Amino acid sequence: MSAGIDQIIFVTSKGKHALEDYFDLSPNLENWLRKRGKDALADKVRHIGSFCEVMSVRQKEPLGLGHAVYCARNMIGNEKFAVCLGDEIFPPWDEINQTKAPLKKLVDAAVELNSSTVGVVEIPLQDSASYGILDLGGKDLGDVPLKVKRTVEKPKPEAAPSKYAIIGRYVFDSSLFDALKETKPGVGGEIQLTDAMDKLCAAGKLHGVLLKGCRYDIGNPLFYMKAQIDAALRRPELSGRVREYMKSI
Ligand code: G1P
């Protein structure tokens, strides 16, 4: 999360408090650290607990990503908002992500084009059934965002309209909620965000933005491990010991 985000809404479910707790203040821990002279750590704890306003809403039944986003409609009202899927990470140490954070790229394009925007990457066609895919009318997506003709959730490769896959970063306005309200269960019997986005396409109100920086899909255990290792190697207090350990095995 970068500077400029001042409100986060987590869509959670029963028994999942970890995120709200993490972003809460922890006076006991902070005092404990200060008493032992660990002010730098205490400052870190305070910073995490106070750098933005955190709200949460429960998704009471797992009815799909579209339904999860719809659960936040009353908190968002008429504001423009971003949707970030927590299992997709764009590490801040990557040079491209650092130059311009993916979300910032999407926000800037949304403002400039007065349109909703969705971040995509190019994938091998055989992986299309794992993603929402954009129909760009056969055009190649470069640095300039393109109007999306259609969005298709998890098509088989032979039905995929392109290689441009949605990777969990979106910017919308409240018209998405009207679309979601009308969206029936789709792939997997779930209310799909991609199906609601398809309704925005009909109004010419969705643009695809190519994201080029490093990304980890941590829903995949291998990439989860890679993300952990890469993060550890970039922390001065850990990198030497992690390197040594990896050599030893
Ligand atoms: C969800 C979306 C899909 C998107 C993907 C990105 O799928 O439904 O359109 O491409 O996230 O990670 P899920 O991975 O939850 O099955």
Image: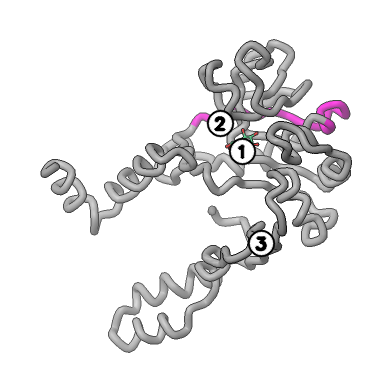
Q: Are marks 1 and 2 in contact (CB under 8 Å)?
A: yes
- Give the mark nearer the N terminus: 1 vs 3: 3
Query: Most extreme residue toward the bottom, as rendered?
Result: 35
Q: Please give the range of residues in magenta.
A: 199-212
- Give the mark nearer the N terminus: 3 vs 2: 3
- Image quadrant where one finds the C terminus: top left
Percent x, y of residue 195 = 77, 33
Percent x, y of residue 94 = 41, 39
103 or 20: nearer the viewer: 20
Residue 152 painted magenta: no
Q: Count the numbered circles shown.
A: 3
Residue at (69, 23) in percent of width and height: 134
Q: Is residue 181 left or right of residue 187?
A: right
Q: Secondary structure at mark 2?
A: loop
Percent x, y of residue 218 = 46, 42
Find the distance from the CA under tag 3 to the CA under tag 2: 24 Å
Q: Residue at label 3?
A: 7
Q: Is residue 44 above or below residue 134?
A: below
Q: Residue at label 1?
A: 105
Q: Secondary structure at mark 3?
A: strand
**Which quarter of the rendered image does ligand 1 occupy?**
top right
Disc number lying in front (1 or 3):
3
Give the amino acid at mark 3: Gln
Q: In the rendered image, is residue 30 in sight? A: yes
Cβ of mark 2 under 8 A from ligand 1:
no
Q: In the rendered image, is residue 98 in sight? A: no
Residue at (68, 42) in percent of width and height: 107
